[in-house]
Structure formats: C-alpha cells, structure tokens
Image (cartoon, helix red, strand yellow):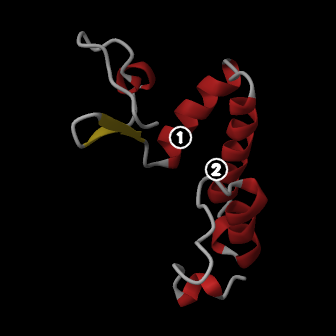
Amino acid sequence: MSNWAPAPEGGGDPRNYFGVGIIIKHGETTLQYLVRSIKDLDVIISHFDAYPLISQKWSDYKLFKEAVALIKNKEHITKEGFKKIRGPVGPWINPPPPPGGGVDSFFKSFY
C-alpha cells in the first residue's frame, strides 16, 4: 500500500489495525506499508477473507492470495511455479521487463 498517510492521532494506521508490518517513508508525501513475512501476510489474508474487497480489488486479491499460496507451498522455486507467479497469477506483483532488456540471465532462462 503506497501513497497512504495516517491520521495525526494514529487512526487508520495499518500497523495498528493488523498488528504487523512497517512503514517506509519515500520523500515528503509518500508512505509505503510493507509486510515481509508469510506469517504476517496470513494475518492480512485472513482479514480480507472475512471482509471481502469490492470491485476489481477482489479479483486482484484472489490473484495475490494464489501467489502467496504458491510461495507457501514452495512452488515459486520451480520453473513452473515461477512462471505462474510471474505470468497470469501475478503480473502486477512482478511486471514483465521492458522489451530489449532489464532481466538478468537467471530469469531469462525461465522463458
């Protein structure tokens, strides 16, 4: 979550709400909420399973949840699993590189 600013009294801070994550400041006007562990992601996934998002956000969430499941099952370390996360499951997680470069030889070997 980026471009979010907490209320001065701390209301709306996702760290307080979920009890996980950190806030990183990028410049004067942008904050980023960052969750780094699968355990912490499970807290957030449980919330959105109980309180579904509306509109396109729900579809995005389902793709995100599927990508997390692949990682939990260690499928992301296989060529096929990597392609699932990189391809239709989560192109927004790791967008494809621009034509003509931007990917090192390790990742090129998957395509």
Residue under label 1, please give it.
41
* Amino acid type at image mark 1: Leu
Res. 75 visible in picture? no
Residue at 64% across / 26% down in the picture? Answer: 48
Residue 98's tag is: none
- Which of these two is toward me, 72 or 90? 90
Nearer the observer, 21 or 103: 103
Q: In this view of the protein, which residue sits in the foreground, 71 or 84?
A: 84
Q: Which amino acid type corresponds to the residue marked 2 in the rendered image?
A: Val
Q: Is residue 1 above or below residue 50?
A: below
Which residue is identified by label 2? Answer: 68
Which residue: 68% across, 65% down?
A: 86
Which element carries disc 1, helix, strand or loop?
A: helix
The answer to the question of whether label 1 and label 2 lie on touching residues, with beta carbons closer than 8 A, is yes
Where residue 92 appears, as percent x and y from the top left, is 63, 52
Task: Please provide percent x and percent y for residue 45.
Answer: 61, 33
Residue drawn at the location 24% of the way across and 9% of the way down: 9
Task: Judge left or right: residue 6 versus residue 35.
Answer: left
Distance, label 1 to label 2, CA atoms, is 8 Å
- Asked whether, in this view, residue 28 is left or right of residue 73, the answer is left
Residue drawn at (28%, 34%) of the image: 29
Q: Which quadrant does the C terminus fall into?
A: bottom right
Give the image location of residue 97, x and y in percent: 59, 71
Rendered location of residue 46, percent (x, y): 62, 28
User: Residue reaching furthest front?
Assistant: 99
Q: Secondary structure at mark 2?
A: helix
